[in-house]
Image (cartoon, rainbow, N blue to C red):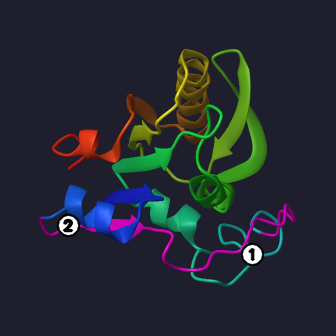
Amino acid sequence: MRMIIHDLEQSDFQRLFSRPLNHTMVISPDATIRHCLGCFGCWIKTPGACVIRDGFGNMGEHLSKCSEVLVISQCCYGGFSPFVKNIFDRSISYVHPNFRNRNGEMHHKRRYKNTANLRVFFYGETITEGEETIARGLVAANALNLGWHAAEVSFSYDIAELEGRVG
């Protein structure tokens, strides 16, 4: 399965993805998502699932079924937009609370065995070179912690530049 996580307006998303999206789960800002509380209930009380029940409580499980995760996000100071960041925060149940040493660094123990290719498309009119560097590092660190491959990170100044590249 493929997952698309995006913060686009519905009209922009439809312009980029005009064909049917078979075997694809789309996570978009058109539904209300509550913020992660940092309670670690997804590790202790309900292992693998967030204790908040707002339609985004099973993000970790959904990610476990993916072979590709495509993210389209406004670049905010070298990071993801608040919506996309919140999705990743709410997906912490994808990993265990325990740590393992991987490549000389501490990373969460994996809960699931799948490996996904992470493709990230940042957009914004004023992305600086420094923000690009920070964003590339963030995506690489996220992919490493999740046991995924950082397959692609790119930057566009206008959403229209993404046409034909993200599908």
Q: Is residue 71 above or below residue 37?
A: above
Looking at marks 2 and 1 on the same chain, the residue that comes earlier in the sequence is marked by: 2
Q: Is residue 81 above or below residue 136?
A: below
User: Residue extending furthest left?
Assistant: 19
Type of amino acid under label 2: Leu
Q: Where residue 35 sits in the image (x, y, percent)? A: 74, 68
- SS state under label 1: loop
Q: Is residue 26 magenta?
A: yes
Which image quadrant for residue 131? top right
Q: Nearer the viewer, residue 22 or 73?
A: 73
Front: mark 2 or 1: 2
Q: Residue at x 62, y 37 (%)?
A: 79
Type of amino acid under label 1: Thr
**Counting other residues with Cα less than 10 Å from the Cα at mark 1, is it few (<14), some (14-19), or many (20 or more)?**
few
The magenta segment is: 19-41
Total labels drawn:
2
Q: Residue at x 24, y 66 (%)?
A: 14
Residue linked to disc 1:
46
Is the C-beta separation of discs 2 and 1 under 8 Å?
A: no
Which image quadrant for residue 48? bottom right
Q: Where residue 36 sits in the image (x, y, percent)? A: 76, 65
Q: Residue at x 73, y 79 (%)?
A: 52
In the rendered structure, the answer to whether residue 4 lies left or right of residue 31 reads left
Residue linked to disc 2:
21
Of helix, strand and loop, which mostly describes the magenta segment? loop
Q: Quadrant of the N terminus?
A: bottom left
In the rendered structure, the answer to whether residue 30 lies left or right of residue 106 reads left
